[in-house]
Image (cartoon, helix red, strand yellow):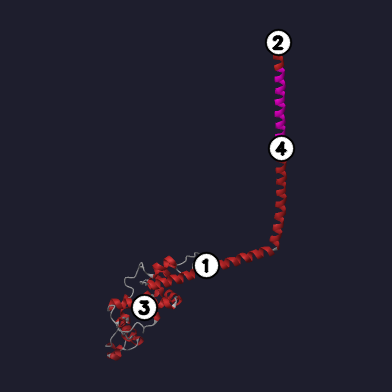
Amino acid sequence: MVQCLKRSLSSSTLNHVVRRKSISGMNTLHRTYSQSSVYSTPMNISQNLNNESFQEFYSYLNGDEYYKKVGLLWENLPQETRDIFIARVMSKKCVQSKGRNSIDCLDGLKYDVASELFDGCKTPTKNSYLHFQGKLAPHFYGVGQGKYDAATVSRIIGRIYNQELSLDDKRRLKDETMEIYRNVVRERLYGAKQYIEINNIKSKNDPYLSTVDTWSEKKIGQRVEEINSLIRRIEAKQETLTEKKKKKKKSIVNSIGRHSKKLVKILSKKNIDS
């Protein structure tokens, strides 16, 4: 019976395809595909988590949909961040299983309970890495758009970093984030200065631009001179008009004075005669 159960998958599936004529063949146990795979694959429920391969562990946690993206994200993370993540998950499981004061609490972390590692961690808490990092991270728009799915990456980060952080972890992450921010700003300022200097040198050495500049200076200079001469003419005309107005006023005043003197003389003569 043990030999029958440990047969390979191919030999057991032949019972479904080929009909045997012998009596022993007719009495053979016909097993389904799932039963064959269960019997032919050895199982060890108490197998430790560290003995499992990394790929199977992450495929089990996140599913085939996020398998490649989780692997890529995990490889790009710094080693300290990985250690913090693994330590937090293991300590959380130890506290849940046997308590804080247990020395051998890590022995309770088995592969059969790996699905419970992320229970109750679907949304980031207030002290989680995702919530804390969102306040500090620099936001540069238009960088790497279309390369990765932002929603998928956010979900993966939320799953990995949704653990409570200590004050030391927060300070360290804050310092790292500020250092990255300063480096990025420095690089961008340096690149902008180089771009401006290169463009200035190119514009000075470009013969086409130099001819355009000389032509524009010549034409603009001529137009400016014409406008200045026109302004001078208008000002001269205004001065002549004001002079004429002044002379006119003086002549009118003089004529009024003469006429008034004549009237005074006439009136004085009439008074004497009367």
Neighbour class for label 3 at 10 Å: few (<14), some, many (≥20)? Answer: few
* Cα distance between the residues tagged 4 and 1: 62 Å
What residue sits right under mark 4 in the picture? 239
Q: In the picture, residue 218 is in which quadrant?
A: bottom right
Q: Earlier in the sequence, mark 1 or mark 2?
A: 1
Where is residue 45? Give x, y as percent.
30, 83
Q: Position of residue 157 (x, y in %)?
A: 40, 71
Q: Name the element at disc 1.
A: helix
Mark nearer the N terminus (4 vs 1): 1
Q: Nearer the viewer, mark 3 or mark 4?
A: 4
Question: Along the polypeptide, which appears first: circle 2 or circle 4?
Answer: 4
Q: Is residue 79 above or below residue 11?
A: above
Q: Position of residue 206 (x, y in %)?
A: 69, 64
The amino acid at mark 3 is Ala
In the depicted view, which residue is nearer to us: 143 or 39?
Answer: 143
Secondary structure state at the residue bearing disc 2: helix
The magenta stretch spans residue 125: no
Tell me the mark number nearer the camera, choosing from 1 and 2.
Answer: 2
Tell me which segment is drawn in magenta: 239-263
Locate residue 174, reporting x and y percent. Answer: 43, 70
Q: Earlier in the sequence, mark 3 or mark 1?
A: 3
Give the residue at x 64% y 64%. 200
Q: Is residue 59 left or right of residue 222?
A: left
Residue count near mark 2 (Cα–Cα under 10 Å), binned few <14, some 14–19, many ≥20: few
Dot 4, how many residues are within 10 Å of its Cα: few (below 14), some (14-19), or many (20+)? few
Tell me the number on the disc at residue 87. Answer: 3
Mark before the other along the chain sequence, 3 or 2? 3
- Mark sitting on residue 185: 1
